[in-house]
Amino acid sequence: MPFAERWRMTCGLLLLFLILGGESTQVKRAGCKSVHYDLIFLLDASSSVGIDDFQKVRQWVVDLVSSFEIGPDKTRVGVVRYSTQPMTEFELGTYEIEEQVKAAARKIRYHGGNTNTGDALRYITTHSFSAEAGGRPSDPSVKKVAILLTDGRSQDHVLEPATAAHKAGIKIFAVGVGEALKEELDEIASEPKSAYTFHVSDYDAIDKIRGQLRRRLCENVLCPRVRVEGDRFKETKGETIPGFDLMESFRVREIFGLKDNGIQSSYVRLGSFPIVQKTEDVFPQGLPDEYAFVTTFKFRKSSRREDWYIWQIIDKYGIPQVSIRLDGENKALEYNAIGLTKDAVRVVFRNGRVSDLFDRNWHKIALSIQPESVSLYIDCKLVQTLPIEERENINIQGKTVIGKRLYDSVPIDFDLQRMVIYCDSRHAELETCCDIPSGPCQLTVVTDPPPPEVISTVGSEQVGHIKTVNCSCPPGEKVCITSRRVSF
């Protein structure tokens, strides 16, 4: 029986059991759609903006509001405009449905005057998020967010009031237009500055960042931060970005212990017992709408032909919420997720490059999960992009598993070096593959003192206590150097 039919039959039997048993089927879904905010738009309405460009600002607010679930128990929206003085257009508690908020946003008044951004920041910190203004300061699940839009230099100081806002738990996105100063935007924005600061050339361009701003808002609320080593990404040097380090979440390094063969980066050998955690402990607020799944692993002899999940989230009834399946018999990789309008949506990658995964060498898989497509990268090269139907938020009342067989959930024998989820789907294509032996980087191995006589071989040269294994780097790529101590 094909896998899809077995899966549908399992889901149907489970549903029937729950209905006949009288048990509640209420689920706890979590993700970007379920995160609720107290959201303040802080809009520069000074003379430098002008009435024509301010109309574009009104429409920008309207369009952004459409991407949130508006309601008294969901996201509340307020607007403060400022010039010489800040002025509330409407409070967080004024409107309860989306259409009311959008209608009010279309009528935001333009005033003109000076640009006192510091006073405006101080005003929203002390007033706009208060309970009197309709805020929910006593509810820790509601995130306090301000989106500031300005086109010029402030005529008062911004650092002190911005710092006070950050200490009050307000996340500030600073959007600069035209001549807005980057240094000032950085003083205003929350940390990390690269995630909370935007700059566009003019007001015609502000709509281009709307989707990116919405994604950043979600990923920086849902996701913790993971450190990226200096040679992992093409454009990143040892900074932290939003994501989940699954090896850390599951404590696999501590439980199984690290192995090191002197060439490959340290890894763990799995398969002796199940790797399982409660999903609420790993993804307490679910997964973002877009993300990248990246893992570096190697099959062992016993697992090459197995049909198994390298990573899976299931609900408390065992119904899959999201899965990455490796089918050793058919040499295929499948991404499966719960669908918005159907039980499940999936894409299957099956070609010669996917077949290469099933040898016994180290490989890196990177999946870029986007709203309408899934892209597969193997060893840092794009293999294929396939369309996918709309996905639903995951049910976090269940378990998250690493490395289990499809049919009976038996642990799979394989070697794992790394497993991480980045909360930005674009990071799948930024990986360098400097962490696998076949990657495009030069590897330097620091050895113990060599014997008195050294014999040179083709492709390597001995200099002192350093053995350099020659590898090729693509034109324009930065050479990565990794040092490890081994014995010969």
Image: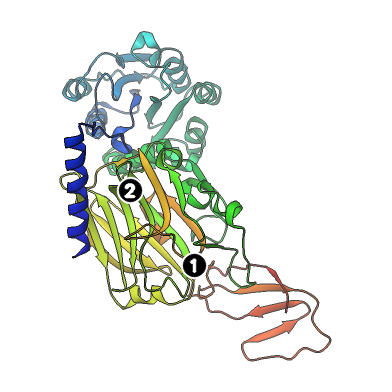
Q: CA distance from mark 1 to mark 2?
A: 22 Å
Quarter of the image holding residue 195? top left
**What colouring method underlies this structural image?**
rainbow
What residue appears at the point 48 percent right and 64 percent down from the top-left corner? 296
What residue appears at the point 45 percent right and 21 percent down from the top-left corner? 121
Quarter of the image where the C terminus is located? bottom right
Residue 388 visible at all: no
Graded by Cα atoms within 10 Å as few (under 14), some (14 to 19) or many (20 or more), the crowding at tag 2 reads many
Quarter of the image holding residue 329? bottom left
What residue appears at the point 41 percent right and 33 percent down from the top-left corner? 173
Q: Which residue occupies the extreme right position in the image?
A: 452
Q: Secondary structure at mark 1?
A: loop
Residue type indicated by callout 2? Glu
Residue type indicated by callout 1? Cys
In the picture of the structure, the residue carrying the numbered disc 2 is 290
N-term mark: 1 or 2: 2
Graded by Cα atoms within 10 Å as few (under 14), some (14 to 19) or many (20 or more), the crowding at tag 1 reads many
**Picture layout, residue 1 above or below residue 152:** below
- Left or right: where 265 falls relative to 169: right
Residue 405 spot, x, y in % from top left: 37, 61
Residue 442 spot, x, y in % from top left: 59, 74
**Picture layout, residue 441 above or below residue 135:** below
In the picture of the structure, the residue carrying the numbered disc 1 is 433
Residue 362 spot, x, y in % from top left: 49, 72
Q: Secondary structure at mark 2?
A: loop
Quarter of the image where the N terminus is located? bottom left
Residue 477 visible at all: yes
**Picture layout, residue 351 above or below residue 228:** below
Who is closer to the viewer here, 394 or 67? Answer: 394
Q: Which residue occupies the extreme front position in the image?
A: 21
Residue 31, numbered label? none
Quarter of the image holding residue 283? top left
